[in-house]
Image (spheres, rainbow, N blue to C red):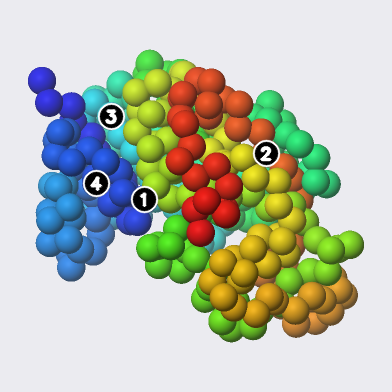
Amino acid sequence: MTPRLLIIGCGDVGLRVLKLLAGRWRVFALTSSPHRAAALRAAGAVPLPGNLDEPATLARLAGLADWVLHLAPPARDGDVDARTRNLLAALARRPPAALVYASTTGVYGDCGGAFIDETRASNPATDRARRRVDAEGQLRAFGRRHGTRVSLLRIPGIYARDREGGHPRERLARGTPVLRREDDVFTNHIQADDLARACLLALLRGLPQRAVNVCDDSQLLMGDYFDLAADLAGLARPARITRAEAAEAMSPMQLSFWSESRRLRNDRLKRELRLALRYPTPRDGL
């Protein structure tokens, strides 16, 4: 029997998953944008009209596929993820065998640059991270209640040369500064194609109700990451500023990324999902 997969939020990463499958699976893609239907169909998916903010549009999802890949972000407001709640209410009528959710490493909050693994307690510092923690809790409870094997992929910064907005060159071209070394924070990354492969492997091999850090092997300060990207792209390295100068020049959103520092371990990614990274460092991927 041909495997049946439902993708929720089939953007850049979802399209990369479709490319990996190359028509070997029957794939359905939920979309709230009618103009995307042709592109999804061309990529190999059956487009399904529906909106996670409108529960009545989700009724047809129940029992549609044995596997679900949930890549859709929460809404922009609040500290709970109503979209995931609406999705799970629809799926509960005929639960899937496996569900993979694209979460964020922001659930850990600031770790002071320490090395951490998935046993680190969640400590979200922003509303957007709190929405992800809420979604993770909903999904774990759903998995335990319905016997669905749920994998929570905790994802850092996604990049790729061919990903819109996913290459540092745009920021470098704008001349956006970075923190001076003594104020800098550790940042983590994953190349988009490696992430797509991790999504598929989690569907096949993920352990029940298990979180997995999906990151590469690098341990870079954020400024060093942008210096590397500048050198590889033949652009000027960004200016370095103090944290006090950043507080005056940057938006709250930009500052939030400079207020958290952590170095992620990816042992579960390699041991349990058995992913061999094609791009183990940003130097390989950029």
Is there a contact, CB below 8 Å, between mark 4 and mark 3? Answer: no
Q: Nearer the viewer, mark 3 or mark 1?
A: 1
Quadrant of the frame with the N terminus:
top left
Asked if residue 251 lies left or right of residue 150, the reply is right
Q: SS at mark 3?
A: strand
Q: At 70% from the left edge and 46% from the top edge, which residue is drawn?
A: 219
Q: CA distance from mark 4 to mark 2?
A: 28 Å
Q: CA distance from mark 4 to mark 1?
A: 10 Å
Mark earlier in primary sequence (4, 2): 4
Mark earlier in primary sequence (2, 1): 1
Q: Nearer the viewer, residue 14 or 162?
A: 162
Residue 118 visible in rendering:
yes
Q: Nearer the viewer, mark 4 or mark 3?
A: 4
Can you tell which quarter of the image residue 39 is in? bottom left
Q: SS at mark 2?
A: strand
Identify the residue under disc 2: 264
Q: SS at mark 1?
A: helix
Identify the residue under disc 3: 67
Specify the amino acid type for callout 2: Leu
Specify the amino acid type for callout 4: Lys
Identify the residue under disc 1: 13
Specify the amino acid type for callout 3: Trp
Identify the residue under disc 4: 19
Question: Residue 286 placed where, x, y %?
Answer: 51, 59
Q: Residues within 10 Å of mark 2 (few under 14, many from 20)?
A: many
